[in-house]
Image (cartoon, helix red, strand yellow):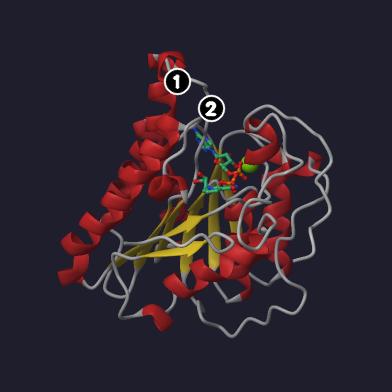
Amino acid sequence: MKKEKKIPDQTQRQPGKETKMKPQPEIIRKGYKGSEKLKNKVALITGGDSGIGRSVAVHFAREGANIAIVYLEEDKDAKKTSEMVKAEGSDCIIIAGDLRDAVFCEKVVEQCISKFGKLNVVVNNAAMQFAQDSLLQINDPQLHQTFETNIYSYFRITRAALKYLNEGDCIINTSSVTAYRGSDHLIDYASTKGAIVSFTRSLSKNLAAKKIRVNGVAPGPIWTPLIPATLDNVSDFGRDTPLGRPGQPSEVAPAYVYLACEDSSYVTGQFIHVNGGEIIGG
Ligand code: NAD
Ligand code: MG
């Protein structure tokens, strides 16, 4: 297979900024045609300012949904996402703040409801990761930061959203390939991503009687701000996958569209593995 061009060296601090990335990620394929799969729906997307979350926001908007996005502090990225959503003919609110704060999680949902009057699709997607060579280097502050951001916020946002969700609505959680194959340098991060898989499966059973579906996406290496912000060397990123390259957000977001819309009405408790060909299972 032809090898892809290497990504130029670059580093950022977390949270990474999409505006600073070279090359710029592809957010939506030029030829992607919407077909009103999410017409009149409202979606809340954490980490929706950039990367996978931004791409999901733009795809959902092209499918007819109004969008609320939550992000930590990347105002420029969030404004651009909002502009892209509005260019699709949808409405968008952007909410900045720290999802490690339980009260903020409640406020986010209330802001979405006061703007749009309802909520149909919750996408839990915000995360941080801090690579360490050894378990001994994962101190308690890091442990708290990773778990509070990556899994507690999923519980809290979903808990706050639950009273507004009805039959036909759904929850989509972003996990990672690291949940399934482990990661020697991201032990705490991979642990939260494993917890997200169990959270998704358990909640899907709990909410099945209410006909609220709960699924997830487990991405492999995707070119987003998280990558230059957390990896020392990005030039070979994704080249060890069977497809030999990193994925673009535009190649992940359609999986969220499928899980959010009626096409997946008989699917709950499942993960879609968008990872360049790594076979998960057994
Ligand atoms: P990203 O940096 O674009 O998105 C992560 C977002 O999380 C940020 O935009 C940030 O605003 C938000 N965030 C982080 N901490 C927060 C906090 N305390 N409060 C509020 N918001 C906070 O990167 P991405 O790669 O698009 O990440 C999206 C999801 O995809 C994450 O769950 C990540 O674990 C997952 N993922 C990414 C990859 C990859 O290779 N990029 C692979 C597997 C899984
Ligand atoms: Mg961001």
> Quick one: label 1, few (<14), some, or many (20+) residues within 10 Å?
some
**Residue at image point 17% right, 60% down:** 206
What kind of residue is marked 2? Phe
Q: Which residue is mark 2?
A: 130
| CB-based contact (under 8 Å), mark 1 and mark 2 | yes
**Residue at image point 39% right, 50% down:** 180
Q: Residue furthest front?
A: 1
Q: Indicate the quadrant containing the N terminus: top left, top right, bottom left or bottom right.
A: bottom right
Q: Position of residue 188 (x, y in %)?
A: 40, 30
52 shown above or below 236: below
Q: Is residue 21 left or right of residue 174?
A: right
- The residues tagged by marks 1 and 2 sit, at their Cα atoms, a distance apart of 8 Å
Q: Position of residue 91 (x, y in %)?
A: 61, 64
Q: Position of residue 250 (x, y in %)?
A: 66, 64
Q: Position of residue 255 (x, y in %)?
A: 51, 69
Report which quarter residue 61 is drawn in. bottom right
Q: Element at badge 1?
A: helix
**Residue at image point 79% right, 57% down:** 4
Q: Element at badge 2?
A: loop
Q: Is residue 110 visible?
A: no
Q: Is residue 108 visible?
A: yes
Q: Quadrant of ligand 2?
A: top right
> Quick one: label 2, few (<14), some, or many (20+) residues within 10 Å?
some
In depth, the one of 280 and 117 nearer the eye is 280
In depth, the one of 113 and 100 nearer the eye is 100
Q: Which residue is mark 1?
A: 142
